Amino acid sequence: MKWFGIDYRYVIAAVGAVFILWYEGSTPVQDEPQAEQAKEKSQPTQSNIEALKGINDKLAELLKNHRDALEGGRADIRAPDGSRSVSVKLSYPERIAQSFSAEEKKYFGTFLLGLTCVETPSYFDYDIDDVNYDFYDGEGTRFDSVKVQMKACRNFNAEVHKQNLDRDAWAASGRLVKSDPKRSLMIARSGTAVMPEIAEEEGYESTADGFKEDGTLLYTIKHLKEQADQFDEEAKYRIKNGSLNGVCLNSDFRDRLNEGFPGFEIRHVDKDGKPIVNVFISETECKKGRPDK
């Protein structure tokens, strides 16, 4: 690279070398290596110790209140005691490690991330780096663990987390419907999983009514302008067909069927609450593409 007969590659290289030498020579010599300084930690004050105890107590109470969401797990919190981590032991005395599905474990991790970041973010203010959750079965076998890094909570997005939690809770609950319906409904009824909504149109009002013991999801649709005796058999069939399309063409509803829930039972009532027709929709009806008459 020559300009006006001078090869500037060497000029640039020489200037760079001089700058490096100057920079290294001007760097102040530190009295102590940074690694040694990093090891030093200020002694915790009594007020900090009390504050940490208060946060631990709050977390313990939250885990107790959300036992349904954690499928009955019993929590034992171990105080930091000079460490920069909080340890939580979650015990399941009535289960064995092999009974926990991958979907359950993923759901536990998502749930605990939100619980920690939303309810106890002040751990970060008292030099706690992370909260470690360890899961043990009835035989004392550690079968899973979740680490929540407190610095990550600074970028916590509540809206995105809610979507992830809803997705993971439904997946875990659906996988348990047949093998352990009781625990499946513990998750579904804990408020963690939000039932998918039926889009309301003018003249209709929809309500999510919960679950049957077998996991069937229940809904009521009220027809606000008609009375039950106005519907003949042909009109009732049109209602059934509309309900079928509403479930089978909606990805949120189809996901529930794919996860293991047996189906949806939709109760249609008139403006006075009198029954018009009940519709049950499962994967079978969706595959057939038509409701039973």
Image (cartoon, rainbow, N blue to C red):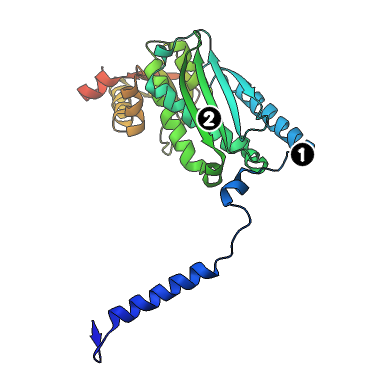
Q: Nearer the viewer, mark 1 or mark 2?
A: 1
> Which quadrant would the N terminus be assigned to in this image?
bottom left
Residue 182 showing in the rendered view: yes
Image quarter of residue 217: top left
Which residue is identified by label 1?
45
Of the pair 56 and 159, the residue shown nearer to us: 56
Instruction: Give residue 219's position: percent from left, percent from top.
Output: 44, 23
Of the pair 122 and 264, the residue shown nearer to us: 122
Mark 1 or mark 2: whose residue is earlier in sequence: 1
Residue lying at the far left of the rendered structure: 288
Q: Is residue 223 above or below residue 128?
A: above
Mark 1 and mark 2 residues within 8 Å of each other at the beta carbon: no
Instruction: Give residue 262's position: percent from left, percent from top.
Output: 34, 16
Looking at the rendered structure, which numbered label has been put on residue 112?
Answer: 2
> Which quadrant would the C terminus be assigned to in this image?
top left
The amino acid type found where label 1 is placed reads Thr
Of the pair 167 and 103, the residue shown nearer to us: 103
163 sits left or right of 39 in the view: left
